[in-house]
Amino acid sequence: MGFSLDDADKMLAGIFAPWVFDLGLKTLGLDDTGGRFLLPANDRLVHVGGVICGQATAGAADTCAIVALAAVNGRFRYCSTVDLSVKFMRPLPPGDAEIRVTVLSNGKRMAYAQADISAVGTGKPAVTTLMTFAYLED
């Protein structure tokens, strides 16, 4: 694979909006089907109900999917999110959360991915997302 963990970390630090960088996302592993990421514990992401807010999980899933697509492609391709569908299956408690991104289809113009987010150590998805991306270049 021509896209390393170091490449992923540089991408997370360099191409996204500053508030995305503030999520503190870390790349745990990459393969030819996607990648694993960590959304570290951050009290600023917990809302009044005592769980990690949906906006943070949706943003994290979208961001990690773009990095996973770069890994599958061997490079970053400019793209835009066309659709993001989020399902909240159970509360995501404060603490570290693992994000597993699976690239479902990766074509010349469009890509589709799924991200499952679970509290570290539980193995039970709390949030699942389906995403569609349009590539803006070849």
Image (tube, rainbow, N blue to C red):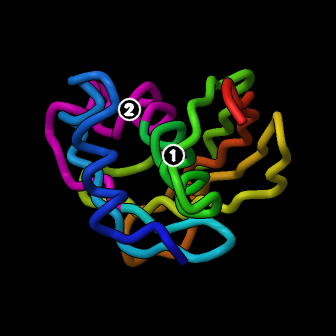
Whether the magenta-drawn stretch holds residue 109 is answered as: no
User: Picture quarter containing residue 135?
Assistant: top right
Q: Which residues are magenta?
A: 38-59
Nearer to us of marks 1 and 2 is 1
Q: List x then y, in percent, for residue 7.
A: 33, 60
Given the image, on which type of amino acid does mark 2 rest? Answer: Ala
* Label 2 residue SS: helix
Q: List x then y, in percent, for residue 89.
A: 64, 47
Mark seen at residue 56: 2
Q: Nearer the viewer, residue 52 or 71?
A: 71
Question: For this view, does 71 lie left or right of residue 40?
Answer: right
* Label 1 residue SS: loop
Whether the magenta-drawn stretch holds residue 41 is answered as: yes
Q: Nearer the viewer, residue 76 or 132?
A: 76
Mark seen at residue 76: 1
Question: For this view, does 112 lie left or right of residue 65?
Answer: right
